[in-house]
Image (spheres, rainbow, N blue to C red):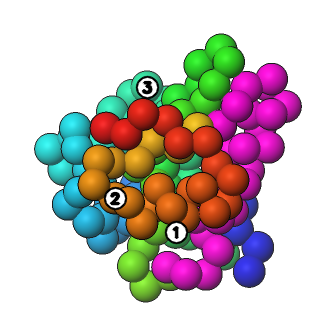
Amino acid sequence: MPVYFESAEQPSTQDLADLEKIYADAPAWLLPPYANGNALLEQGLAQKTLVAGRFNSRLLGAALLEKQTDRWLLSHLCVRELTRNRGVARRIVQEASRLAAEAGAALEVVIPEGQQHLCDLAREKSLIIAKTV
């Protein structure tokens, strides 16, 4: 399934509804330091750090991507529950990694404390793990 990566700087009304659904499906451990998914979305939109994966005109996954000079930090990656395990997260990570490399930066993933299975998966995929939060 072709999933397209994009910056969610000016989301449509439908995009906003999709983003809310994505983070409504997020496990509680994924959201801190944000109080809830809406707070995460507000911050991501305000700081222009929100990126998403689109398929058939709908957003299925999203994350925050903080672009620093020598490293980009990818955090709060979430995919709607009904579309998980179909490559959406993988596509977001791949494209963020490609764009970071083009900018001369390394992509690092931020994994919440206590999520060892995610750390193991990141290492298996040869991703750089930033300090966990």
Say what secondary structure mark 3 lies in.
loop
Q: In this view, does 38 lie above or below 91?
A: above
- CA–CA distance between discs 1 and 2? 22 Å
Residue with the mark numbered 1: 60
Disc 2 or disc 3, which is closer to the eye?
A: 2
Q: Are marks 1 and 2 in contact (CB under 8 Å)?
A: no
Say what secondary structure mark 2 lies in.
loop
Would you call the spot at circle 2 few (<14 residues within 10 Å), some (14-19), or many (20 or more)?
A: few
Residue with the mark numbered 2: 115
Going from N to C along the chain, the mark reached first, 2 or 3, is 3
Amino acid tagged 1: Leu
Going from N to C along the chain, the mark reached first, 1 or 2, is 1
Q: In this view, does 109 lie above or below 91?
A: above
Say what secondary structure mark 1 lies in.
strand
- Give the residue displayed 79% in from the left and 43% down from the top: 98
Q: Which residue lies furthest to the right in this view?
A: 102
Left or right of residue 66: residue 20: left
Would you call the spot at circle 1 few (<14 residues within 10 Å), some (14-19), or many (20 or more)?
A: many
**Residue 34 makes an appearance in the image:** yes
Label disc, if present, on residue 73 of the rendered structure: none
Residue with the mark numbered 3: 47
Disc 1 or disc 2, which is closer to the eye?
A: 2
- Tell me, yes or no, whether the highlighted magenta stretch contains residue 127: no
- CA–CA distance between discs 1 and 3? 21 Å
- Give the residue displayed 61% in from the left and 69% down from the top: 88
Q: What stretch is highlighted in magenta?
A: 84-107
Q: Is residue 54 above or below residue 35?
A: below
- CA–CA distance between discs 2 and 3? 26 Å
Amino acid tagged 2: Gln
Which of the pair 103/5 is nearer the observer?
Answer: 103
In the rendered image, which quarter contains the N terminus? Answer: bottom right
